[in-house]
Image (cartoon, grey):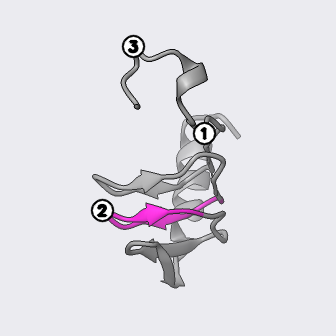
Amino acid sequence: MTNPTIPDEYKKEMKKEVTIGKHSIVGAGSIIMPGVTLAEGTSIGALSLVRKRTEEWSIYLGNPAKKITNRKKDLLDLEKQYLENEGKL
């Protein structure tokens, strides 16, 4: 029984916080399980199932999601340039 109208005492739901780090991307239709942390710069491909913590600046894909390669950090230079131009640094 999983219907929201069923009292909690009759369900075994797991409710934990999901943390999504700065510069992370989650593709459409992906599922991030309760309690998982997506580290800074993580990229999750569409329709992936993430069951455990990710590594920083990595790309994950699949069901279950597996690391396929490292992600470039060019974005950090663009962020710095943007913040300097906006007078926020």
The stretch in magenta equals 39-51
Amino acid type of the residue that numbered disc 3 sits on in the rendered structure: Thr
Cα–Cα span, label 3 and label 1: 17 Å
Name the N-terminal-most of marks 2 and 1: 1
Q: Which mark is residue 47?
A: 2
Closest to the observer: 84 or 12? 12
Cα–Cα span, label 2 and label 1: 21 Å
**Is the residue 47 above or below the residue 64 in the image?**
above
Find out whether residue 48 is within the magenta segment. Answer: yes
Closest to the observer: 78 or 46? 46
Residue 42 x %, y %: 55, 64
Q: In this rendering, which labeled residue sits more in front, label 3 or label 1?
A: 3
Instruction: Give yes or no for contact between labels 2 and 1 (Cβ–Cβ under 8 Å).
Output: no
In screen coordinates, is 36 left or right of 47?
A: right
> Which residue is painted at 40% across and 31% down in the image?
1
Task: Label 3, secondary structure: give it.
Answer: loop
Residue labelled with disc 3: 5
Residue 36 x %, y %: 63, 53
Task: Label 1, secondary structure: give it.
Answer: loop
